[in-house]
Amino acid sequence: MICFVGAGPGSEDLITVRGQRYLTEADIVIYAGSLVNPGLLKYTKEGCRIYNSAHMTLPEVVQVMEEGEKAGKMTVRLHTGDPSLYGAIREQMEELEKRKISYEVCPGVSSFCGAAAALSLEYTLPGISQSVIITRAEGRTAVPERESLRSFAAHQATMVLFLSSGLAEEVSKELIAGGCAPDTPAAVVYKATWPEEKKFVTTLSELPGKMREEGISRTALIIVGNVINSEFERSKLYDPGFTTGYRKGTDSTEVPAAGKEK
Ligand code: SAH
């Protein structure tokens, strides 16, 4: 049995209950040592074999999984945050599928959720933005041209940039070129939920200078948008006048169907 487990953003108690249980049951753990908190390994049992994938290639990772499977072992592949975001899990899954090895995925708390918590942010504020664009600046991994930061800027939606903290200059330049105002709020959270977490709020034009000043060039998220520091409309969901499928409001002109999300 192979299980891809989301380790959460950093703090040892932000792994899910299920993820923690899998760690306690594992005979083999392969963890992404560059980002996963090694403190999580304390949940493993005596004799569990631990591998740090930061020093391994894909074939080496797959070989450990395959040998473990042949020996009837339970293997946990521990990825930072939630494995579905920049986790390079599909390529591992494909290799397992080729070998007819079954696997399961246990989701995790992504760092973009950890960063929102650190900043007391709501990414989707009524009247400001109802969408979150999760993306990255182009680095060694290419980003399709149709997903350029410049083109996303046109939406003025909340943006969360992974893997881009060494590219702040580029991020600022591209988003402003795409139509974001230079004074659009931008926030940075370094090592969200870790004891050494750092965070600050600035503007898009000041972002590169501020990041240099703070010495942040890795393990950080850049969040851009007017949901940071902004005046917004209150939600309809909790408006005393608004009737929902669960609650009758004082003003019943708008009656959404029961169960419909608003
Ligand atoms: N699957 C992970 C992302 C892996 S990509 C997730 O869901 O969070 C690695 C990038 O994630 C880093 O370059 C950084 O941009 C971001 N990241 C991961 N952990 C972080 C943390 N605790 N605080 C801020 N950014 C983090």
Image (cartoon, rainbow, N blue to C red):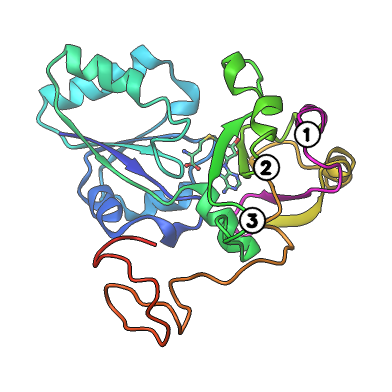
Residue 148 is left or right of residue 11, and the answer is: right
Give the residue drawn at x 14%, y 22%: 101
177 drawn magenta: yes
Q: Residue 156 carries which label?
A: 2
* Relative image position of residue 133 (x, y in whole percent): 56, 39
Ligand 1 rendered quadrant: top right
- Pointer 3 residue: 128
Q: What residue type is labelled 1?
A: Gly
Q: Earlier in the sequence, mark 1 or mark 3?
A: 3
Q: In which quarter of the image is the C terminus?
A: bottom left
Q: Nearer the viewer, residue 227 or 88?
A: 227
Secondary structure under the numbered disc 3 in the rendered image: loop
Classify 70 as above or below 110.
above
What range of the chain is rendered magenta? 170-195
Q: What residue type is labelled 2?
A: Gln
Q: Which amino acid does label 3 sit on?
A: Ile
Q: Do the residues labelled 1 and 2 touch (CB within 8 Å)?
A: yes
Residue at the limit of the structure toward the front, as seen here? 253
Classify 197 as above or below 64.
below
Give the Cα separation between the discs numbered 1 and 2.
Answer: 8 Å
Give the Cα separation between the discs numbered 3 and 2.
Answer: 9 Å
Give the Cα separation between the discs numbered 1 and 3.
Answer: 16 Å
Give the residue drawn at x 64%, y 31%: 152
* Relative image position of residue 234 (x, y in whole percent): 57, 72
Label 3: few (<14), some (14–19) or many (≥20) C-alpha neighbours in 10 Å: some
